[in-house]
Image (cartoon, rainbow, N blue to C red):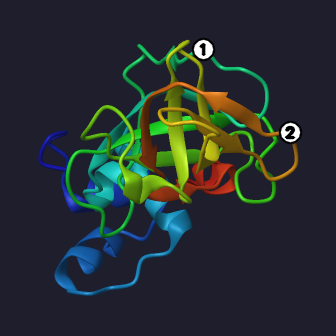
């Protein structure tokens, strides 16, 4: 409201709410506000619900394959997604494309990672990870050791494994925002 120079009463009217609705929300600490009301207020302010709630955003840096091959498709649009609850530190988000990891990951889901190191840490073996191959392909898979040192197998839930590949980096999936949750936030 301060950024837009709007007072509570005119905002309430513009959002189609009762004259005192916004003032009442601001005066009552811990007041419950319905999602529909937040949407109306956000629209009236030409803002997002996340802006109203003060939710920190995470950059959506690209896409990751869960079936089929995705050469890391870097997102240059500067699109962001909400930070997962309780997550700290530097995060990035990737959009899942494909269905080889159903039912755990679906096309359109957003997976969050914290990529602090290149290479593969032993602690990541057996975890669901975002994995970049030396060839540039990037996947979301269950990471397993390969048949020889320095090579890895990427396990799918409902497709053939990708065996004995060289990995540039791998990092565990920290959080998943299902595509349905993402769609709900964009309404």
Measure the C-alpha gap from mark 2 to mark 1. 19 Å
The image position of residue 35, as x and y in percent, is 52, 68
Q: Nearer the viewer, mark 2 or mark 1?
A: 2
Q: In this view, does 168 lie to the left or right of 133?
A: left
Residue 67: name its quadrant: top right
Circle 1 is placed at which residue position? 71
- The local crowd at label 1, few if under 14, some if 14 to 19, many if 20 or more residues have their Cα within 10 Å, is some
The image position of residue 129, as x and y in percent, is 52, 47
Circle 2 is placed at which residue position? 160
| Nearer to us in this view, 55 or 37 | 55
- The local crowd at label 2, few if under 14, some if 14 to 19, many if 20 or more residues have their Cα within 10 Å, is few
Q: In this view, does 3 lie to the left or right of 187?
A: left
Residue appearing at x 45%, y 65% in the figure: 17
Q: In this view, does 47 lie to the left or right of 186?
A: left
| Nearer to us in this view, 163 or 4 | 163
Confirm whether residue 13 shows in the render: no
Residue appearing at x 70%, y 52% in the figure: 105
Residue appearing at x 42%, y 76% in the figure: 33
Confirm whether residue 149 shows in the render: yes
| Nearer to us in this view, 37 or 176 | 176
Please tell me whether mark 2 sits on a helix, a strand or a loop: loop
The image position of residue 42, as x and y in percent, is 41, 50
Residue appearing at x 36%, y 60% in the figure: 12
């Amino acid at each position: 409201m301060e950024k837009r120079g709007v007072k509570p009463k005119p905002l309430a009217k513009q959002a189609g709410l009762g004259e005192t609705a916004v003032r009442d929300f601001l005066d009552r600490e811990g007041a419950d506000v319905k999602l529909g009301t937040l949407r109306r207020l956000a629209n009236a302010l030409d803002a997002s619900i996340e802006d109203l709630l003060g939710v920190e955003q995470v950059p959506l840096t690209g896409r990751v394959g869960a079936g089929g091959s995705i050469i890391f498709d870097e997102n240059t649009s500067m699109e962001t997604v909400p930070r997962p609850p309780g997550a700290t530190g530097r995060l990035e988000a990737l959009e899942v494309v494909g269905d080889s990891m159903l039912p755990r990951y679906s096309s359109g889901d957003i997976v969050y990672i914290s990529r602090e190191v290149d290479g593969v840490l032993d602690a990541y073996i057996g975890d669901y990870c975002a994995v970049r191959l030396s060839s540039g392909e990037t996947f979301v898979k269950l990471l397993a050791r390969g048949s020889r040192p320095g090579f890895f197998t990427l396990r799918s839930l409902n497709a053939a494994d990708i065996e004995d590949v060289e990995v540039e980096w791998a990092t565990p999936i920290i959080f998943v925002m299902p595509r349905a949750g993402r769609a709900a936030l964009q309404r």
